[in-house]
Amino acid sequence: MRRLPGPRRGDHASVVPAVNQVELHPYLVQSEVRAYGNEHGIATEAWSPLAKGGSLLSEPAVRKLAETYDRTPAQVVLRWHLQRGTIVIPKSVTPSRIAENLDVFGFTLTEADLTALSSLDRDERTGPDPNTFNVA
Ligand SMILES: NC(=O)c1ccc[n+]([C@@H]2O[C@H](COP(=O)([O-])OP(=O)(O)OC[C@H]3O[C@@H](n4cnc5c(N)ncnc54)[C@H](OP(=O)(O)O)[C@@H]3O)[C@@H](O)[C@H]2O)c1
């Protein structure tokens, strides 16, 4: 167990988390949270990695890359996560989609592709914002 140096007990937590799960997808790229995690050895895990399977999967930039690589939009988004080093566990109750979501190791996005997907960032959440969650 690693401990952060310095803090007085009770000021804040002293044990470094192994994983930080936050909402993360091309509409919410979480640059600062990821940079902090990288700096401190905290793995970042994507919550709602497909933005709940909504409009992200119809984005022209996503669809274009899907055509280029002869893959599905979901597979392109999952590759974006994996190549950025994010832990990704997509949810599906559909057997064909579960298979599709696992079949993401036969192609590689370029740096330009990754940048194009990251540039879709619009700070948009599908879930609650932890900065305001449960604040009256
Ligand atoms: N710890 C917690 O409290 C908590 C809460 C919520 C979620 N989670 C976890 O977070 C993860 C993300 O879940 P999420 O539901 O929020 O978001 P998500 O994985 O971003 O999206 C899931 C949605 O996308 C659809 N989908 C999945 N694969 C697809 C594909 N290949 N093509 C098109 N649509 C596809 C699914 O539909 P179908 O299912 O109909 O196929 C479902 O509606 C899951 O692992 C879940 O267990 C954790």
Image: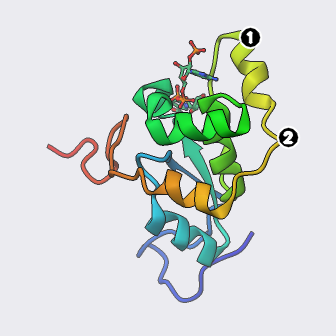
Are discs 1 and 2 less than 8 Å apart at CB? Answer: no
Compared to residue 33, the image places residue 40 above or below, namely below
| Three-letter code, disc 2 | Gly
Rendered residue at 71%/74% (across/down)? 2
The crowding category of the residue bearing disc 2, from other C-alpha atoms within 10 Å (few below 14, some 14 to 19, many at least 20), is: few
Mark 2 beta carbon near ligand 1 (under 8 Å)? no
Taking 117 as reference, is 66 left or right?
Answer: right
- Percent position of residue 99, x then y: 79, 20
Of the four image quadrants, the one with ligand 1 is top right
Q: Please tell me in which quadrant of the rendered image residue 75 appears.
A: top right
Quadrant containing the C terminus is top left
Rendered residue at 55%/38% (across/down)? 64
- Percent position of residue 117, x then y: 52, 51
| Three-letter code, disc 1 | Pro
Find the residue positioned furthest to the bottom.
6
Rendered residue at 49%/77% (across/down)? 9
Q: Is residue 70 visible in this depiction of the protein?
A: yes
Mark 1, secondary structure of its residue: helix
Q: How is the image coloured?
A: rainbow
Compared to residue 116, the image places residue 90 above or below, namely above
The mark lying in front, picked from 1 and 2, is: 2
Q: Earlier in the sequence, mark 1 or mark 2?
A: 1
Residue marked by disc 1: 95
Compared to residue 94, the image places residue 70 above or below, namely below
Quadrant containing the N terminus is bottom right
In three-dimensional space, the C-alpha distance between marks 1 and 2, rounded to whole angstroms, equals 20 Å
Label placed on residue 106: 2
